[in-house]
Amino acid sequence: MKIEYSKFFLAVLFCMSLSVCSADLVLSDRGKSDYQVVVPDSSADPETGEWLKQAARLVQAAFKVNGADIPVAAESGKDPGKPGIYLGDTEFSRQNGIKLSELKGWGYFIKAVGSNLVIAGRDKPPVVKPEGPREQISWDQLWPCIGTVKGTADFLREYAGARFLYPEIWHWEAPSELARLDFTNSPCMEFIKSDTIVAPSDLDVRKVPFVLYNKGYPRESIWDIALNMFPLVDISTGGHTYERAAPVEEYYDKHPEYFALVNGKRINAGQYCISNPELQELFYRDLCKWLDKGYEIVGLGQPDGFQCCQCDDCKKLFDTGDDWSEKLWILHRNLAERVLKLHPDKTVMIMAYMHTEKVPKTFKKFPANTMIMLCGTNDKDFEDWNKIEVPKGFTSYIYNWCPNQGGVYFPTRTPLFVETQVKRLFTNHVQGIQRDGPGLLFGLEGPVYYTLGRMIDDPETNRANDIVNEFCSAAFGRASAPMRGFYDALYHGVELYSDYLGTRCPAWTYADINGRRRKFVTDPFQLIGFIYTPDLLSSLEKNLALAEKTADSDRARWRLALVRREFDYVKSTAAVVHLYHAYQVKPDRVSRDQLLDAIDARNALINSYYVEQPRTKPSPGWSLRSMTNICAKPIPGWPETLFPLHSPGHLKMEYNLYQGAFKDTAFNWDTKTMRNAPLPGVKRAVVKPAAGQVAIDSPAWDLAETNILEAMPGSQPSLTCKTSLRVLSDKDNLYLRVESELPAGMKDFAAVARDGDMKKQESLDICVAPFGNREKFYRFKVGPATGSKYDAAIGFIADPMDPRWGLDDPSWNGEWEYQSLLEPDKKRWLAMVRIPFKTMGVEQPAAGAIWMGNVGRTHIAAPDRQEVSIWSARPDTRELNAQSFGEIVFDK
């Protein structure tokens, strides 16, 4: 009885399944299909036609994986006896009520018409015409909108098991490059096999993604379109547009009055006198010029690191006093109002950034053509901006992959972070996303990018957990379980950074008890060591090794090879950090040699990622101007090398970048030289009190202690010319005298203008931090020639978004004196600097007070050789910076 009842139940289920199938479009069944793909006879332009051709190939691939071969035909040549999958603006779609003119952005229709299926989107070539090769012009130009490809990708994902996991083509490349790829056997996508491909017979979808663009690198691939990473189409976000309207090189010499007056001088650093009516006219004409070209949206925004003009007219401008935020808002609103009269159907996108980050105070409504690009997109930002009427709504500039001390090749965000972020952007009606840092880690952050894109598909119901599972199952097959463990561990380790410490996150900066804006993390080694603990690295290694052992397909193994390459880089970099910290704790030769071994191993690993061969096109992160014959080594199976995307020097972190000062860290030690060098250490200089007037040759200097400058760690092993430092003080001034040996006959030196570049000149570099810490200090540079002097303040810029944050600000010009005495007969140069305490904003230090500072010398030993010496140094010091400061102690 039990067996017969079971048979009855199965029979009922079978009948039910037949009933369901009879109401569906069965596009493919057990390797057979009667369908054909039909494309329009002609397209709006060749690139649109090429995209439709690739969309048709994509449909063919989905069917082929399931055993069915279906033909592609132009509409005039289709088989009238077969049903069709119609792509794009076909006559069939128009006859059946598809009105593409109703669509906006990247919208599309998917509609079942009898036994046929229509997928048609807004396919719009750019109005703006190219003015040169794609890779040599603005990222904001040339991209077509291909809504049909978006609709095709979404349909195949929903009904044919397609998963778009990684980009398939290079930046700037045309869709014709896709023709060389076999979609059925590419690591960039996966098709989940199924006995049938079925769609509802009443399928009728009209969808418009909520973003007009989601811009990172200049690329338009199937992956980008499928995951809503849309390029700009007839949109110029602009950002910092003053320079575009009035380039320094074109206008400074002819019209210095257009530029900001700072400390009594019109500066040529891309800062402007916004009260100047002629300059305002240039801003207006610039906006109109871009709209006249055909752009629908044009950006407007003040320069990065905006410096306020100190002229009288700017002080009086708009009667806002010192409120420069309001001056800029009123100026930008007025410009938008003028543009509205000439271009009532176009949009001005005004950037809300730094000075304009806060909402305007003197008005609550923008002109009808105004859109605001928000650079702050946290809840509090939206709370304030939702009180202001912005007729065209908001776009966003997000800092997800603008790294804060971690470097661009470390994961920075998690699926949880982007899930929350997309929901917030959607809730607040954000229409566009510009990503600062596109994301470069498709192995380690692939699930994050995938989650970002899939959340945009349906912000209200999609969940990051389901999306990551979808990604791992498609990408790694049988190895998905250990890879889910790998990513869970990785993102748990990164979550604190992602949600709190990352750029623009709640704990990125804070105000201390003195009201100063400070960053929680300013040391990249501190951050890397904190996140990538030995336990975490061990866990990641175990999961990845298990996945590599478990993988059951070539495509899964190719994807794991990408993860392995990126993870090994992170692991080797973290090893250097941990061993450096061990060396700090115990600075002996054993610890140092272990560290040097790790540095050499990391460099060898990075070198193994490259090969030398002729290059025919730039890597994504390399411009045409920087092309060399060093290319990233391909990873088997991949159509393009996704890691590394930059030069070896970039991967080794040889540079100081925004929020990532790596140049002078242990990553860049000259390990060969250091193995034979003595162990360096931080020094202490005693400031002796001076009685009477102090001159460069006063007897008082004989009573001051002598402090010897030594070779910069990691540079030349010995110096040909010695240098020493002595320090005195009286009730009003600090005096520093440096005695520098010179080679015989060296007596003529070129003068350097005030605040000029002395990096390649015989010079002294003096830093004084009178506040007892390394965060704020003053820099004074001098050369042997009379008048060769430079000064700057460091650490006084409070806004971390300001590009000058943490760097020299040479606009500070303090009152101080410099004396230079060349004595060729004694083969020496004497230099004395007198710095009044009031210049540094401090009182006379009490006996026993401890300041910080350092002195360095650049000696031109030969036309092609410099010797760099320094008084106080750490093992990782490569140039005079705050981390190398010694103590300056005022004698009791």
Image (tube, grey):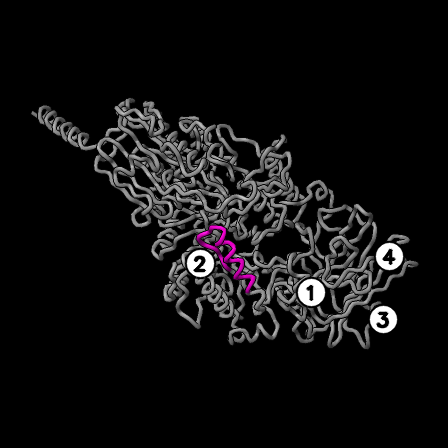
What residue is shown with label 2?
Answer: 343
Mark 2 is surrounded, within 10 Å at the Cα level, by few (under 14), some (14 to 19) or many (20 or more) other residues, namely some
Q: Residue furthest right?
A: 825
Disc marking residue 698: 3
State the extent of the magenta-drawn residues as a range: 281-300
Amino acid at circle 2: His
Magenta span: predominant SS is helix
Nearer the viewer's eye, disc 1 or disc 2?
2
Crowding around mark 1 (Cα neighbors within 10 Å: few <14, some 14 to 19, many 20+) is many
Report which residue position mark 4 lands on.
748
What's the distance in space between the residues labelled 1 and 2, CA to CA? 55 Å
**Residue at image point 38% right, 51% down:** 422
For disc 1, the marked residue is 768
Q: Nearer the viewer, mark 3 or mark 4?
A: 4
The answer to which of marks 1 and 4 sits earlier in the sequence is: 4
Numbered disc 2: secondary structure: loop
Residue 693, given in percent of the width and then of the height, sits at 82, 76
